[in-house]
Image (tube, rainbow, N blue to C red):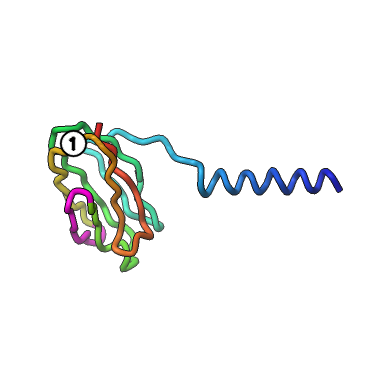
Amino acid sequence: MILINLAGLVLIGLIIWWFWLYKPVASVASAKQTIKVADGVYTPAHIKIPAGKPVTLNFLREDKAPCSEMLLVPGLGISVSLPINKVKAIQIPASPAGSYAFHCQMQMYRGDITVE
């Protein structure tokens, strides 16, 4: 009985870690990098860019869900429509250091841009 309870607690801990605590390693964005919108996620979802320099990020929408159509970066005033199966270049203006969330209009697809 004790082993079953311990196994249950370990499983609960793993679930909490996976869904709420796990953060994938951020990738370094460049002008040549393409961020894919597919299967309900942005890949990569965590992007680092340099502060004080404008950057172009390329988004490729492969997901046909209506929610994936819009890309919003509220902290930078960006709102664009992403065409299906075509690369869309998004201009990120020179920004001060900080973290800027990006998401779809219903906030089901999420990511963040870290400006360093």
Q: Give the vertical position of 1 relative to 83 (above or below).
A: above
Q: In x, y percent, where is residue 72?
A: 24, 56
Residue 44 picture quarter:
top left
**Circle 1 residues within 10 Å: few <14, some 14–19, many ≥20:** few
| Residue position marked by numbered label 1 in the rendering | 96
Which residue is the extreme one toward the right? 1
Vertical order, 64 against 93 (above or below): below
Residue at 29% over, 38% down: 114
**Residue 16: % across, % down:** 58, 47
Q: Nearer the viewer, residue 54 or 37?
A: 54
Provide residue 6's location: percent of width, then percent of height: 76, 43
Q: Is residue 18 magenta?
A: no
Question: Which residue is at a point 36% across and 36% down the rendered structure image?
Answer: 26
- Image quadrant in which you'd find residue 50: top left
**Residue 96 in which image quadrant:** top left
The three-letter code of the residue at mark 1 reads: Pro
